[in-house]
Image: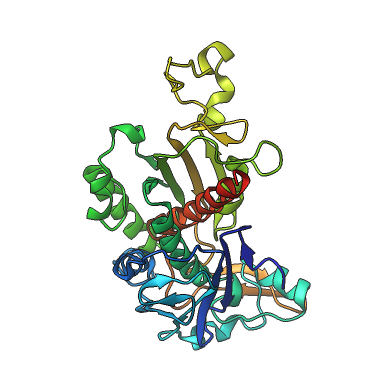
Amino acid sequence: MAGNSFGKIFKLTTFGESHGAAIGGIIDGCPAGLSLDFETINTEMQRRKPGQSSIVTQRKEEDKVKFLSGIFEGKTTGMPIGFVIENTDHKSQDYSHIKDVYRPSHADYTYDKKYGIRDYRGGGRSSARETACRVVAGAIAKQLLQNIKITAYVSSVGEMELKKNYSEINFSEIEKNPVRCPDAEMASKMEDYIKSIRKEGDTVGGTVTCVIQNVPIGLGEPVFDKLHAELGKAMLSINAVKGFEYGSGFAGTVMKGSEHNDIFNEDGSTKSNHSGGIQGGISNGEDIYFKVAFKPVATIMRKQETIDSKGNKAEAEGKGRHDPCVVPRAVPIVEAMAALVMADFYLLNKTSRL
């Protein structure tokens, strides 16, 4: 299986399956001498882990990270950073009923046809469990980036949308509710809605908005390695993501050029920021902001028509522990992937100036 690595200089390779002994990764290219705050890494893991509230899967994983290499006396050595996260609460029996059945909108069918074998226990490698490794690497990338601030939050669940610009939001409110929506009233409505969807045996999608602040000018390359293109790839690599837009996004298509153009101030800043902090694929010093769209979780607690591995008609019904809405736990994953992109371009930019 190819495609297990992300990044060019700051590079993450992950391994492991949802119901295997452990998942883990190798971070290569992290500069030597970076003092790591392990409590911060643990905090990021707690934000993503299952079982943290009543509106997410009740799988109980501590998600404690064990570092194996690349760190000495609390500092990075410049060598590959190896780490593992043990799987301690997997219940493989919950998936025995789908051993030979393809769940609609899952990776079951495509994995089986591509590889001739699939790990049906929790989806195996296709499980969002793998994203825990990304959060570890993202937490380290954030510490490398220092002044660059990356903040994500839930901006919609189903048809309920927080219609506020990120500049109108108090980011300190994000972690005060299980939905991670920085508006108490809207968060309460979203939480009630997710609970009602769960009672129906169904799921719902939503969007996560991410803002990257204090970005230096010059990150990104002008042709194939555009900054927004790499951010898009990073976000679209996350499980259940169906869309990505940055800056004005699709709303910009109905504007005139005279309305959309970001007029310069004398110091090089811009009066507006429809460009989303990126012009010509290169950061311009303004805030980078984008939205990531997540589909409803494919596993629902209802019977659905499907086929089995022999092509016969069959029924599939979700069992076990699953998220009724993935967006609350996706917030730290979005931040982590953004941090990996920014760290890679930060190091690439330093190399290009040697």
The answer to whether any part of residue 159 appears in the image is: no
Percent position (x, y) of residue 167? 32, 32
Residue drawn at (59%, 24%) of the image: 253
User: Camera-side residue: 223 or 333?
Assistant: 223
The residue located at (60%, 74%) in the rendering is 125
Figure disc tally:
0
| Residue 100 percent across, percent down from the top left | 67, 82
**Residue 226 visible somewhere in the drawing:** yes
The foreground one among 333 and 187 is 333
Say which of 100 and 114 sits in front: 114
Question: Whole-percent x and y of residue 332?
Answer: 40, 58
Image height of 261 relative to 315, above or below: above
Q: Residue at x 43, y 75 (%)?
A: 71
In the picture, which quadrant includes the N terminus?
Answer: bottom right
In the displayed structure, 3 sits above or below 185; it is below
Q: Nearer the viewer, residue 152 or 80?
A: 80
| Residue reaching furthest to the front | 354
